[in-house]
C-alpha cells in the first residue's frame, strides 16, 4: 500500500493516530500538523525516530499551521485527511461550549483542506462528532461519500470489550454493532451482536445486557471522568487508523462509521452512524443490517435528534 495521510491536530488523538499510521508501514508519508508552534514538528521527529527500533520506513512530516492558513500546503496530494483538531471534553464541560469551540476549529481547518487537499477523503474525529462531520462536509463542499466521521468503530469496540469482560471470553469471540449517534443518541444493536455465533440475548440476561449497552453509550464520559484532563485517545486512534487503511488500501472493509444517509433504513439527509463499505472514494455503499422493530425505532429517533442538531449548525 502506498499513499499519503495527513492528520490535523497533534494532540493526544491526532499524534497517536499519526503514530499508528506510520508504524503500520502502509503509507509513503504521514503528515502531522498543529497550530502550536513546533509541536507537530517535534512529534514527527519523535515518531520518525521509532523507525529503526520498530522497523518501518514511513516518512513522517510535521508542520505548524497558522490561523490564517499558513503551512496547510503540506496537505497537497493527501489521499486521506484525519481532522483531529479541537478541544477534548473535560468533566463538567457543557455540550454547547464544546460545540461552539470546536465548530470554529473545524470551519477553519475544513476550508484549508478544501483548498489544498481537494481530492482527499476526510475522516472527522473532532467532537461532537455527528455535528462536526456534517459541518466539515458543508464547509469543504466535498461529496458526502468523501466526508465521514469516526464513531462507530470505537463504540462497537467498547461494546465488544464490555461484553467480553462481562463473560470472561476473548474479544475475538464477540461481534457487536452500534448505530446512530456517537454520543447520547447511540443505538447499541444486540440483535446483530453475537458471542461465538450465539445471539447476545442468549448469553447475557436482560439486566446485564442493558448495563453493558448503557456503559457503551457513556464509555467516552467514563474515561473523561477518570482522566480529569483530556479524553480517550488509544482506542479512538486505532479506530481512525483502521478507517484510513481501508480507504487508502481500497479494501471494501465494512466498518460502522458516521455517514450520510439517502434513504437507507428509511432515513435521509443526516450524518448518522451506520455500517459502510469503505474504499478509495470513501463510502462505497451503506450496508443495511436487518434490525428488530424496536432497534429501527430507536435509530429513527436518533436520526431525528441528530438531524436537528446538524441543521442548526452553519
Ligand atoms: N488547527 C490545528 N490544530 C489545532 C487547532 C487548529 N485550528 N485548534 C486546536 N488544535 C490542536 C491543539 O493545539 C491540540 O494540539 O488540537 C490539539 C487537540 O489536542 P488535545 O487537546 O490533546 O485533544 P485530543 O484528545 O487530541 O482530542 C481532539 O478529538 O476525540 C476528539 O473530543 C476530542 O474534539 C476533540 C478532538
Image (tube, grey):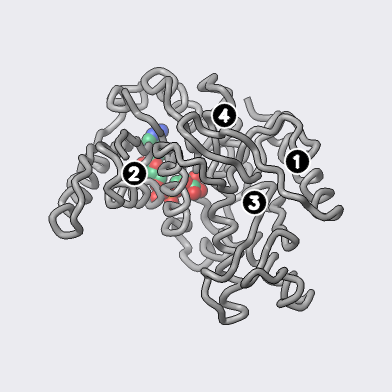
Q: Nearer the viewer, mark 3 or mark 4?
A: 4
Question: Upstream in the sequence, badge 3 or badge 2?
Answer: 2
> Residue 145: which disc?
4
Mark 1 secondary-structure assignment = helix
Q: Nearer the viewer, mark 1 or mark 4?
A: 4
Question: Upstream in the sequence, badge 2 or badge 1?
Answer: 2
In the image, is residue 295 above or below residue 35? below
**Disc 1 versus disc 3: distance between alpha carbons?**
12 Å
| Residue at which label 2 appears | 10
| Residue at which label 3 appears | 183
Q: Is mark 4 within 8 Å of ligand 1?
A: no
Mark 1 nearby-residue class (10 Å; few <14, some 14–19, many ≥20): many
Q: Position of residue 128 (x, y in %)?
A: 58, 43
Q: Nearer the viewer, mark 2 or mark 1?
A: 1
> Residue 294: which disc?
none
Q: Is residue 128 something that shows in the picture?
A: no
Instruction: Report whether 302 appears left or right of 247.
Output: right
Question: Upstream in the sequence, badge 4 or badge 2?
Answer: 2
Q: Position of residue 15 (x, y in %)?
A: 33, 48
Which is more toward the observer, 309 or 83? 83
Residue at 38% x, 23% y is 117
**Disc 4 versus disc 2: distance between alpha carbons?**
25 Å
**Disc 3 versus disc 2: distance between alpha carbons?**
23 Å
**Disc 3 versus disc 4: distance between alpha carbons?**
22 Å
Q: Is mark 2 within 8 Å of ligand 1?
A: yes
**Disc 2 versus disc 1: distance between alpha carbons?**
31 Å
Q: Position of residue 141 (x, y in %)?
A: 54, 19
Amino acid at each position: 500500500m502506498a499513499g499519503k495521510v495527513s492528520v490535523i491536530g497533534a494532540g493526544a488523538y491526532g499524534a497517536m493516530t499519526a503514530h499508528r499510521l506510520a508504524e503500520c508501514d502502509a503509507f509513503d508519508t504521514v503528515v502531522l500538523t498543529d497550530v502550536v508552534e513546533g509541536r507537530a514538528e517535534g512529534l514527527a521527529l519523535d515518531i520518525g525516530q521509532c523507525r529503526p527500533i520498530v522497523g518501518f520506513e514511513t516518512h513522517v512530516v510535521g508542520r505548524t499551521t497558522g490561523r490564517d492558513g499558513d503551512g496547510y500546503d503540506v496537505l497537497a496530494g493527501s489521499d486521506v485527511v484525519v481532522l483531529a483538531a479541537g478541544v477534548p471534553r473535560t468533566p463538567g464541560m457543557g455540550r454547547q461550549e464544546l460545540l461552539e469551540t470546536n465548530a470554529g476549529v473545524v470551519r477553519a481547518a475544513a476550508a484549508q483542506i478544501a483548498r489544498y487537499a481537494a481530492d482527499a477523503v476526510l475522516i472527522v474525529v473532532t467532537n461532537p462528532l455527528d455535528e462536526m462531520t456534517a459541518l466539515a462536509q458543508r464547509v469543504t463542499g466535498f461529496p458526502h461519500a468523501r466526508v465521514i466521521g469516526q464513531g462507530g468503530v470505537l463504540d462497537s469496540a467498547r461494546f465488544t470489550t464490555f461484553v467480553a469482560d462481562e463473560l470472561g471470553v476473548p474479544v475475538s469471540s464477540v461481534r457487536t454493532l452500534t448505530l446512530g449517534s456517537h454520543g447520547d443518541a447511540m443505538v447499541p444493536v444486540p440483535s446483530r451482536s453475537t458471542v461465538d455465533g450465539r445471539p447476545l440475548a442468549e448469553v447475557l440476561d436482560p439486566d446485564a445486557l442493558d448495563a453493558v449497552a448503557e456503559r457503551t453509550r457513556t464509555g467516552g464520559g467514563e474515561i473523561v471522568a477518570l482522566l480529569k484532563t483530556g479524553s480517550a485517545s488509544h482506542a479512538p486512534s486505532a479506530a481512525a487508523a483502521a478507517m484510513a487503511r481501508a480507504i487508502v488500501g481500497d479494501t471494501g472493509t465494512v466498518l460502522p462509521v458516521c455517514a450520510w444517509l439517502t434513504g437507507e433504513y428509511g432515513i435521509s439527509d443526516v450524518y448518522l452512524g451506520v455500517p459502510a463499505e469503505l474504499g478509495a472514494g470513501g463510502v462505497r455503499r451503506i450496508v443495511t443490517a436487518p434490525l428488530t422493530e424496536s432497534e429501527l425505532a430507536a435509530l429513527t429517533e436518533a436520526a431525528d435528534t441528530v438531524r436537528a442538531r446538524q441543521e442548526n449548525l452553519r
